[in-house]
Amino acid sequence: MKRSIDGILTTHAGRLPGPPDVAETVRAIRQDRPHDKETFATRVKDTTHEVVRKQKDVGLNIVSDGEVGKLGPFYNRLENYGPRQFAPGEEPRGGGTPRGEWQLFPTFYDEYWSQTGGSSLLPLVCTGPIRYIGQEAIQTEIANFKAALEGVEVDEAFMCSVSPGWLVPGFGFREADFQPHYKTEAEFFFALAEAMSEEYRAIVDAGFVLQVDDPRVLSGWDVPHPRTGAHLTLEEYRKEAQLRVDALNHALRGIPEDRVRHHMCWGSWKGPHTVDVPLKDAIDMVLKVHAQAFSIEAANVRHEHEWKVWQDVQLPEGKILIPGVIAHATNLVEHPELVADRLVRYANLVGRENVIAGTDCGLGGRLHPEIVWAKFQAMAEGARLATDRLWRR
């Protein structure tokens, strides 16, 4: 994996904006509506070319395929695991997002989910032995990405996949949703890990860096336990989070750490986030993931102060930190000087060669495309300013 040897490298969290017609076809497929498969395949391939070149043009060093046209793991990747209907009396709002905070901001969340469609997010259920069936889908994505990279000089290329923990909304999963097929929560998680490991290996075997998206290792904190309705204690949260880390490491076995980056955040919804778990209470577990690089949300106003955690926590030898220096939660385009300040701050704590500029989360689908590319330009300029400060002064 590339390091910032001669200057601060730039990257992002994976998801990029695509054209409206591709997004509409994705919705049609998920809703089992008719669509032209051949036209969709061509559009995804062409759009992958476009987003790779745009990343290069705005100054990004480490690029992705943009996850263009990706349906998600529940539509063409996993057998016997997917959405189910809500049970009588079950809280439908927002899928697996924080419910404790709804009690603090009830009117906001009622309005927010009605505007964003959060109530349409269904819970998930296991209906049999879980098996990976996404071989054709991942190989198509790999082929599209390789074709898009032809003639484009970049420092490195990565592809995203989801962690076993991401596949389970909230903490304290309902036994009824995986029994009788799996006896325990741990057995269920490791079955998900075993299935996803096939996709991980396919990405690495194709020559790409694997990014594992794992937001729920942090964002699961504020979801009441489904069996008791009580908020998890910190000890209970850490136990649940550790299970997710253990399952992910099982899925990553045999894959060199220097081919893996781990992305985490407190969730992409644009809420107050007043009850997020503090980074200091989770970072020790996160650093146990068998990855070389750690991409973490660091630019939003609720968590930006947590750069101070690295005053007390030592980044392990050989590891890389990818702090978010531009945010997905605001339309404001960060000033390059602010980006540089953030990067220099981290470089002074963990070493300049161990820092890569990143984003808090994927920007595609969360901000207008014009704003996304403007933010990337600001990040690239900020990285150049930080490089001048760190290497040339």
Image: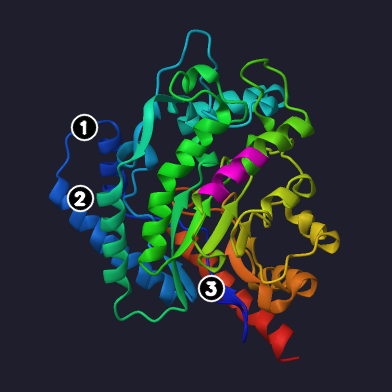
Q: Amino acid at mark 1?
A: Arg
- Label 3's element? loop
Question: How far apart in space, not on screen, are marks 3 and 1 (Cα)?
Answer: 41 Å
- Which of 131 and 298 lies nearest the eye of the viewer? 131
Question: Dominant secondary structure of the magenta stretch?
Answer: helix
Q: Secondary structure at mark 1?
A: loop
Q: Which residue is the site of mark 2?
A: 40
Q: Residue at x 54, y 19 (%)?
A: 175
The amino acid at mark 2 is: Phe
Q: Which mark is residue 33?
A: 1
The span shown in magenta is 242-250
Task: Give the labeled residue for mark 3.
Answer: 1
Which quadrant of the rendered structure holds the C terminus? bottom right
Q: Are marks 3 and 1 in contact (CB under 8 Å)?
A: no
Please state which amino acid type lies under the numbered disc 3. Answer: Met
Determine which quarter of the picture holds residue 322. bottom right
